[in-house]
């Protein structure tokens, strides 16, 4: 499979002589001092090592504290998008790299497990480019290196080559540790020839020209850009011939990739080692979505819907999760309980609240049975279905994007959840591109959260993110290649690192698997609740709920969808009680929201009369939807009257004056559109607001600004608007409207803030009914 990528420069040809290098030895080039000949030889060896090794399989690390510029012709190497030339800036970087290389060499030997003498042979045996090669080029004066650094170099020069780490040293031997020199093939450039100590031979040689080195580097970069590495197949780590053969009684296990010849698996719910939660990080484009897909499919192949339930949230575009629910075919992932596509913070909070409800219910059940954990309960009640729940939250740090009450509650629930959920079989996998710079995850919150997450999986990332994920002393993630991850089961302890080749989530393999799972369970497994944060809704989406409201004595006003698991429409009673008026504030366009709300009342009460005070005239969406709206009202039996701005004051006055003698059983709803433009508003409007609801006359008014609203309703008039809606309303005005000085509200598209002083303890966010067209009107009328 990987034969073309197994090519390696075990030797480099100098003249007629082949000198051992990658996977076989080290080379020391004596610094010629008086001319650049030794630099030319060092560059020639670098070029040959790169050219004779498969693209992308060799990383060149250069420490040039003498500023000789020997790496300059090789800068084009990194133009292919993968960093294979790494320049160390100073001695501190050099020492840090030596420490990393020591851990790396140990890690490679752990992968080989003594099965072969060298990495070259191991890669050939497994027929896959496991790990990679490193050529460390050191151009310095060894006499100024401290004893500790020279000792570390001596260890690596001896142990490194068989693990794929070879050194190319350019320095005088004067002052160098003899042991270090002895680990290298020493050669000197003199008068256009190379003297090689090991064979006491003189090799004819001519230095390469800089233009040749640059051209070679460009060619290598071009080859690298067009080279494709065969990934680890999903079927290599997760057999697909046996479906749902595992029990989750003792935990859930899933495969990730390969560590040498071994399949890397992670078990959550392991009570012996107390591994219950997991953290995944990786920079953009390093395969985090692929890894999450591998985890999900491995779980679903092993465990039936009776054994595992998945709560999947994506705080980005939701692309990773879209395959798990197909609206066209009706297929869905049977293990999925919740799919949060383009989830937002409020939905994330609702999921955590829902999980805590499950936790409390299960713990009561355990207590009644005299047990303390899901494992004990399932051992006692073998015939009862109680699946373990795996919660995967991609880009979880987005839940802390703002410092407010929502993020504070999310942080509190997450910290409590990772500590408490284990007993009832709920396990959390947190995934992110970055966690290092998030202030909300620092201090006690971060310690409380990550202190309960022993399993860390780090894809390639920056040094800072590697430290944030794996710990201050663990920079392994900064040195990974594409499709590699550090899997660490011990809170990031360096000795627990396993460099894993992650399997490829190939849709050609996975899509048929999902279809087979669905075919075998859709008759008994309920579809997941799917939340799409950007999807716009209309009243036509909730016709079943509207039909139930028709059976009630008091009508309900439907305003949109709550943001929660198994969300129901937000319905507010709209009976004949003082204060049952609606104030809508905010710029933008509220026509669809108002039209849908009015239709929800009209379908329930055909005897209703709508009086529309039209201050919008022919502007915007009102012009487009007005005739459709009126026809829909008439189709369900509702009388509709449109009053232009010239007649609005007189019509309102007449209504107000007739309130005292009103006995009509049918309600009247006065709908005010664009009321900021009402310049000559009569005082009787305030009477209508105050006393109208008790005799069945309600106001649904839309103002753009808070000042206009207050001016129209008079001092204390807000108290006669129980129901208050904010669309694109500024934060300060929203606080005033909702009577909450601590309210944190930032208007965003497709969200509405709602408070009913009689029904809701505090303002809540909903997805409003913001769609109204002929199709939705037809569906509403037909069902109504």
Image (cartoon, grey):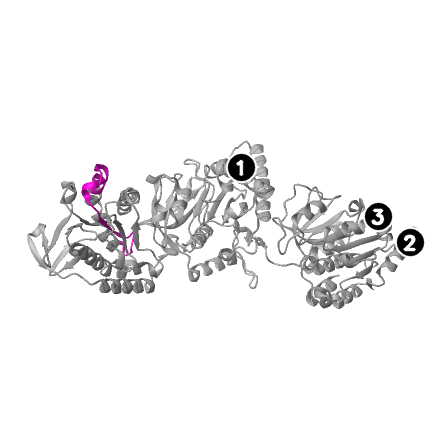
In the rendered structure, the answer to whether residue 27 lies left or right of residue 376 reads: left
Outermost residue on the right side: it is 661
Q: Which one is nearer the viewer's eye here, 665 or 435?
A: 435
Q: Quadrant of residue 175?
A: top left
Circle 3 — which element? helix
In the image, what residue occupies the spot 75% across and 63% down? Answer: 616
The residues tagged by marks 2 and 3 sit, at their Cα atoms, a distance apart of: 13 Å
In the rendered structure, the answer to whether residue 725 lies left or right of residue 605 reads: left
Tell me which label, 1 or 3, sits earlier in the chain. 1
Residue 657: assigned label: 2
x and y, in percent, of residue 110 in the image: 28, 44
2 and 3 marks in contact (CB < 8 Å): no
Q: Which residues are magenta?
A: 126-153
Q: Which one is nearer the viewer's eye here, 700 or 207?
A: 207
In the rendered structure, the answer to whether residue 668 lies left or right of residue 772 reads: right
Mark 1 or 3, closer to the camera = 3
Residue named by callout 3: 690
Tell me which label, 1 or 2, sits earlier in the chain. 1
Residue named by callout 1: 416
Task: For label 2, count other residues whose C-alpha is less than 10 Å away and answer few (under 14), some (14-19) or many (20+).
Answer: few
């Amino acid at each position: 499979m990987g034969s073309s990528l197994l090519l390696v420069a075990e030797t480099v040809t100098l003249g007629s002589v082949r000198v051992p290098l990658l996977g076989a030895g080290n080379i020391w080039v004596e610094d010629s001092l008086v001319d650049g000949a030794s630099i030319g030889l060092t560059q020639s060896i670098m070029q040959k090592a790169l050219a004779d090794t498969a693209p992308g399989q060799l990383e060149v690390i250069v420490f040039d504290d003498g500023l000789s510029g020997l790496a300059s012709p090789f800068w084009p190497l990194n133009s292919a998008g993968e960093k294979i030339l790494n320049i160390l800036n100073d001695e501190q970087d050099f020492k840090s790299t030596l420490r990393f290389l020591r851990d790396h060499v140990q890690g490679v030997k752990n992968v080989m497990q003594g099965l072969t003498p060298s990495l070259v042979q191991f890669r050939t045996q497994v027929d896959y480019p496991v790990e990679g090669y490193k050529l460390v080029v050191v151009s310095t004066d060894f006499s100024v290196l401290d004893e500790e650094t020279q000792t570390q170099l001596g260890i690596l020069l001896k142990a490194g080559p068989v693990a794929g780490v070879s050194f190319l040293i350019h320095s005088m031997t004067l002052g160098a540790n003899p042991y270090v020199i002895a680990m290298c093939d020493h050669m000197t450039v003199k008068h256009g020839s190379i003297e090689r100590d090991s064979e006491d031979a003189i090799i004819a040689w001519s230095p390469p020209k800089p233009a040749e080195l640059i051209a070679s580097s460009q060619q290598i970069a071009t080859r690298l850009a067009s080279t494709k590495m065969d990934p680890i197949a999903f079927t290599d780590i997760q057999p697909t011939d046996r479906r749902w053969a595992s029990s989750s009684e003792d935990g859930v296990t899933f495969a990730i990739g390969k560590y040498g010849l071994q399949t890397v698996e992670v078990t959550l719910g392991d009570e012996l080692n107390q591994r219950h939660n997991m953290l995944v990080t990786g920079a953009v484009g390093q395969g985090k979505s692929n890894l999450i897909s591998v985890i999900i499919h491995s779980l679903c192949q092993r465990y039936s819907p009776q054994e595992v339930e998945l709560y999947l949230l994506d705080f980005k575009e939701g692309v990773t999760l879209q395959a798990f629910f197909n609206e066209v075919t009706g297929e869905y992932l049977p293990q999925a309980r919740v799919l949060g596509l383009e989830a937002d913070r409020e939905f994330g909070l609702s999921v955590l609240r829902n999980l805590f409800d499950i936790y409390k219910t299960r713990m009561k059940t355990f207590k009644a049975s005299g047990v303390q954990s899901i494992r004990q309960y399932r051992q006692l009640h073998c015939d009862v279905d109680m699946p373990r729940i795996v919660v995967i939250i991609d880009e979880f740090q987005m839940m802390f994007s703002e410092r407010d009450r929502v993020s504070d509650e999310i942080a509190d629930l997450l910290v409590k959840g990772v500590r408490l959920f284990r007993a009832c079989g709920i396990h959390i996998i947190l995934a992110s591109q970055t966690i290092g710079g998030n202030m909300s995850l620092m201090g006690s919150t971060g310690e409380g959260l990550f202190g309960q997450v022993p399993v860390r999986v780090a894809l390639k990332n920056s040094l800072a993110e590697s430290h944030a994920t794996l710990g201050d002393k663990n920079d392994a993630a900064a040195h990974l290649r594409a499709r590699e991850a550090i899997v660490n089961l011990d809170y990031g302890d360096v000795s627990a690192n396993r460099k894993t080749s992650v399997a490829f989530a190939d849709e050609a393999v996975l899509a048929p698997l999902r279809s087979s799972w669905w075919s075998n369970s859709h008759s008994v497994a309920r579809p997941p609740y799917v939340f799409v944060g950007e999807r716009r809704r209309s009243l036509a989406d909730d016709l079943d709920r509207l039909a139930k409201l028709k059976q009630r004595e008091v009508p309900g006003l439907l305003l949109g969808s709550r943001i929660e698991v198994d969300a129901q429409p937000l319905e507010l009673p709209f009976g004949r009680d003082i204060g049952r008026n609606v104030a809508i504030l905010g710029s933008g366009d509220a026509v669809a929201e108002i039209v849908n709300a009015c239709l929800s009342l009209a379908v329930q009460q055909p005897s209703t009369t709508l009086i529309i005070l039209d201050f919008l005239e022919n502007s915007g969406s009102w012009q487009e939807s007005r005739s459709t709206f009126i026809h829909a009202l008439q189709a369900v039996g509702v009388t509709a009257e449109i009053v232009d701005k010239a007649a609005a004051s007189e019509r309102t006055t007449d209504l107000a004056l007739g309130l005292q003698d009103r006995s009509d059983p049918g309600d009247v709803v006065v709908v005010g559109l664009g009321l900021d433009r009402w310049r000559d508003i009569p005082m009787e409007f305030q009477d209508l607001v105050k006393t109208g609801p008790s005799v069945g006359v309600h106001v649904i008014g839309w103002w753009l600004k808070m000042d206009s609203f207050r001016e129209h309703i008079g001092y204390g008039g807000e108290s006669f608007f129980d129901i208050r809606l904010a669309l694109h309303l500024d934060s300060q005005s929203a606080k005033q409207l909702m009577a909450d000085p601590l309210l944190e509200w930032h208007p965003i598209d497709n969200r509405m803030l709602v408070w009913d002083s009689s029904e809701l303890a505090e303002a809540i966010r909903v997805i409003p009914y913001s769609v109204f067209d002929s199709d939705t009107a037809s569906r509403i009328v037909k069902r109504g």
